[in-house]
Amino acid sequence: MKICVFGAGAIGGYLAVELSLAGHDVCVIARGEHLSAIASKGLTLRMAGIQKTAIVCASDDPSRFGPQDYVFCTLKSHQAYTAAPSMLPLLGPDTAVVTAMNGIPWWYFYKEGSSFEGTHLSSVDPKGLQWETIGPERAIGCVVDPACEVVEPGVVEHHEFNRFILGEPDRTKSKRVEALSEIMRAANFDAPIREDIRYSVWLKLWGNVCFNPISALTLATLDRMTNEPSLRSLCVNCMHEAKAVSDAFGVQIDEAMIERRLAGRGTGRGPQDVDASGFRAPPYGGDRSPSRSCPGTCEIERRRHTDNRCVARSSGRESHE
């Protein structure tokens, strides 16, 4: 398969190395010193005490590579919007775009089935640029569980987890998503297909709306956030308010999952989002202002007029009564 990883940072680099070593024709889009290192020495993955290097084609110009079978977009949501037009040379008639990023995806209301069908989310896709340029029919949803870090140019370190949850926006088990799941499993990933990918999106978001801004604002590690009473209480409140939003859009997640989410992260000692810690400058870190944490969540909340003050504050938008 011809596979492009658009944004070969921490998660993108992890994907690119494993897919390339599994025998696929992988190219990556990167920039700066990271790109120079990949072009000269290959892309290196450190994982479980083992180091492996894949020689992949790398460029900051997507037009060099032509149409692909799959494009993994591993950029942050605000970066993906600006990059959308440059993806066009990678898109053939049947190319699927795998949105491997956190947050509410730009295609969320494509074949979603509610009165909001076809709605463009201006917070993550201003003026519907991705919707019109890429097309929601190409999208395959992907919820990212692994924690990775770019530790130096051309080198990615894997910390934990290998699961990428996949799903079609229209809830079908299509041939293309089944093929992608098999490709990823053969490359050492856990890649389950979920009938309702929006369930998995929201469950991951329950953690993002509290862990990300709290970590960014306080530098608290995951073990502190989930075990210190005051921080844990704040996390629980944020998750309850995120649940109110997901409930309002028909995504019903058992409340018991709040405790499971907290317990699942409570053994971690690092900050949430490993490559975000320390407010490091790009290319190793990036923009980690709280306003980047959950803009799509807050926009969806506003559209349904759900009272979600905690989530709004976490993303930098104060609510006033």
Image (cartoon, rainbow, N blue to C red):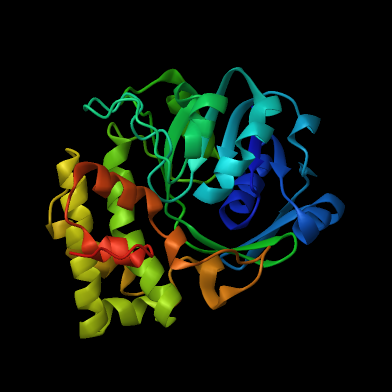
On the image, the x and y values in percent for residue 279 come to 56, 74
On the image, the x and y values in percent for residue 136 come to 45, 26
Q: Is residue 19 visible?
A: no
Q: Extreme right residue here?
A: 40
Q: Extreme left residue here?
A: 255
The residue depicted at 23 percent of the width and 74 percent of the height is 234
On the image, the x and y values in percent for residue 316 come to 38, 65
The residue depicted at 28 percent of the width and 28 percent of the height is 112
Q: How many marks?
A: 0
Quarter containing the C terminus? bottom left
Left-right relation of 152 to 301 = right
The residue depicted at 83 percent of the width and 55 percent of the height is 36
Left-right relation of 240 to 180 = left
Left-right relation of 152 to 211 = right
Along the line of sight, the residue nearer the viewer: 69 or 63: 63
Quarter containing the N terminus? top right
Location of residue 297 with respect to 121 vertically, above or below: below
Residue 165 picture quarter: top left
Residue 68 picture quarter: top right
The residue depicted at 81 percent of the width and 58 percent of the height is 37
Location of residue 58 with respect to 268 vertically, above or below: above
Location of residue 143 with respect to 98 vertically, above or below: below
Along the line of sight, the residue nearer the viewer: 241 or 269: 241
